[in-house]
Amino acid sequence: MANKAQVGKKETASDCWVHLEVKKSGGIKVDLKSKVESMYGKAIRDTALEILKFFGIQNALLYIEDGGSLPFVLSARIEATVKKCFPKKKEEFLRPIISRNLYQVKRDRFRRSRLYIPGDQPKLLINAGLYKPDGIILDLEDAVAPPEKESARFIVRNALREVDFSGAERMVRINQLPMGIKDLDFIIPHGVHMVLVPKCEDAETVKEIDGHIQALRNQFKIKNEIYLMPIIESALGAINAYNIASSSPNNVALTIGLEDFTADIGAERTLEGKESFLARLQVVLAARATGIQPIDSVFSDVEDEEGLKNSIIEAKSLGFEGKGCIHPGQIKIVNEGFMPSEREIERAKRISLALEEAQRKKIGVVSLGTKMIDPPVVKRAERILKLAIQNNQIRANWKEEHKDERKN
């Protein structure tokens, strides 16, 4: 047992710095310095006392420098100091998960945009859902410095329970094994939808992670599925892309991280992307061959909107269905960039109408002109129409409108 611990960040908006010193006598003393003390000082002290009482601490000095942190951040920081002082304590201080976070996601949902948020920066994650990304990634890996990784887990766990992500898919990028196993213990019981597997190089890694997730689901009686997205970030990972993509029935997407990939092969990342073309194509082929979504890497220049748009056009031409975002300003561009074109929508409409006509006539074979339409083509057409409706490109009742046009 350590008698002193500290976590957090001083003079940081929406965060706090907490120092805990456990004593043998003298009771509990909370020393607070807060930007919002006049309004919330009592509430902050009450929360601190509640947490220390929960963990059975009777004598301690708790010093808090608060930059306007929300309760989920404050409680995460205090609990992290307690666990540093008492690493054998297994209890968790958890408030009820908010009702708006009790939603599940479908396996085949749209994953056009996913926004990376460092797991130790609560000021960035509080309003992330307002920008309407398809997914929000609470990052415990590269975006968090090694000394902050342990305390970041508490922030991410509490955020999953208490932050409204406005319907986005709640994702967490864990650390590489074996550290990633401990990350899973923190996030799986608390409403995560997807786990991103970083620097994945073999199927065995995915299987080990998936096995631990299923054990936790059984332990905590979690009914909803928890999906996986392995990230290819090395030459070996690219070579093993198909084995990785097919390693678990819970894989729903496969993506690539080009910063680490280009470093691994000893090349400089360029806008043209010639150095990563083969690896990106391998990711697309592996994903398509296993029936999961191929998702492109992030575009790292947040000020180059034209470059981002061109990158999206290229990604779509290769078969990718989405792209990572490192800044909220990229989300709208990515979402719109992966919207179906007018040509795609019109073809999807014709396929849907042909299928409906064949079913009406009880014809087993569906054709469009001289070409046969097989189930994968129908499925793609349905996805395009669904996306077009979601993006207000066409009305949900477009078939009725089509019938009216034909009558006129």
Image: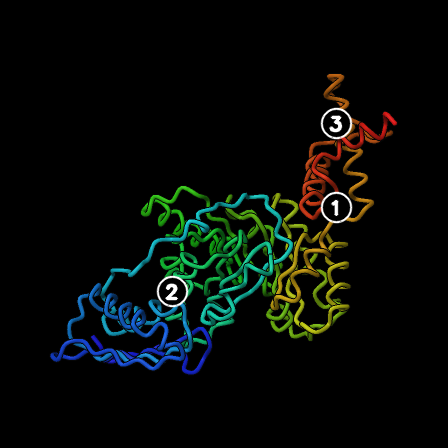
Residue 395 occupies quadrant: top right
Number of numbered callouts drawn: 3
Give the x, y percent position of residue 101.
45, 51
Q: Quadrant of the C terminus?
A: top right
Q: Furthest residue to the front? A: 38
Q: Which residue is mark 2?
A: 72
Vertical side of 210 occupied by 59: above or below: below
Horizontal side of 117 relative to 3 (left or right) equals right
Instruction: Name the front one of labels 1 and 3.
Output: 1
Give the x, y percent position of residue 179.
40, 65
Distance of label 1 from label 3 (alpha carbons): 21 Å
Distance of label 1 from label 2 (alpha carbons): 39 Å
Residue at figure coordinates x 39%, y 61% from the top left: 158
Q: Name the amino acid type tagged 1.
A: Gln
Residue 315 occupies quadrant: bottom right
Are circles 1 and 2 on residues that touch, CB within 8 Å?
A: no
Q: Which residue is mark 1?
A: 393
Mark 3, secondary structure of its residue? helix
Q: Name the amino acid type tagged 3.
A: Leu
Q: Which residue is mark 3?
A: 355
Front in this rendered view, residue 117 or 372: 117
Residue 367 occupies quadrant: top right
* Neighbour tally class for label 2: few under 14, some 14-19, many 20 plus, Cα within 10 Å: many
Q: Furthest residue to the top? A: 362
